[in-house]
Amino acid sequence: MFLVAALLALLAWALGYIWISGLACAFGAPSGACSIPMPWTLRGEDLMILVLMPGAVVAVLLGLACLSGWRAQNSDN
């Protein structure tokens, strides 16, 4: 269950990043020609809001999936 939630959160993170970057491009570039920045090139609050916080959610869900799988495996023995 946690693994499915982690995969859905990862998908939402990727789609949200592309959507927000597209909005920033549309409203920030007068010519309309710009590219979506790579996540590792971001700095400051953009890095925190668009990369680190969603990444932490995905990491916690993956950790919970591993922990629940480990507990289920040990309860069988």
Image (cartoon, helix red, strand yellow):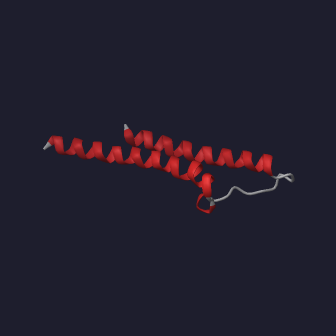
For this orientation, the residue located farthest to the bottom is 41
Q: Is residue 29 left or right of residue 45?
A: right
Q: Residue at x 56, y 52 (%)?
A: 48
For this orientation, the residue located farthest to the left is 77
Q: Position of residue 35 (x, y in %)?
A: 73, 57
Q: Quadrant of residue 72?
A: top left
Q: Residue at x 34, y 44 (%)?
A: 65
- Up the image or down, 75 lies above or below 31; here it is above
Q: Position of residue 22 (x, y in %)?
A: 72, 48
Q: Residue at x 52, y 47 (%)?
A: 54
Q: Quadrant of residue 6?
A: top left
Q: Is residue 44 left or right of residue 1?
A: right
Q: Is residue 23 left or right of residue 45?
A: right
For this orientation, the residue located farthest to the right is 31
Which residue is more in the foreground, 51 or 2?
A: 51
Q: Quadrant of the N terminus?
A: top left
Q: Quadrant of the C terminus?
A: top left
Q: Position of residue 70 (x, y in %)?
A: 25, 47
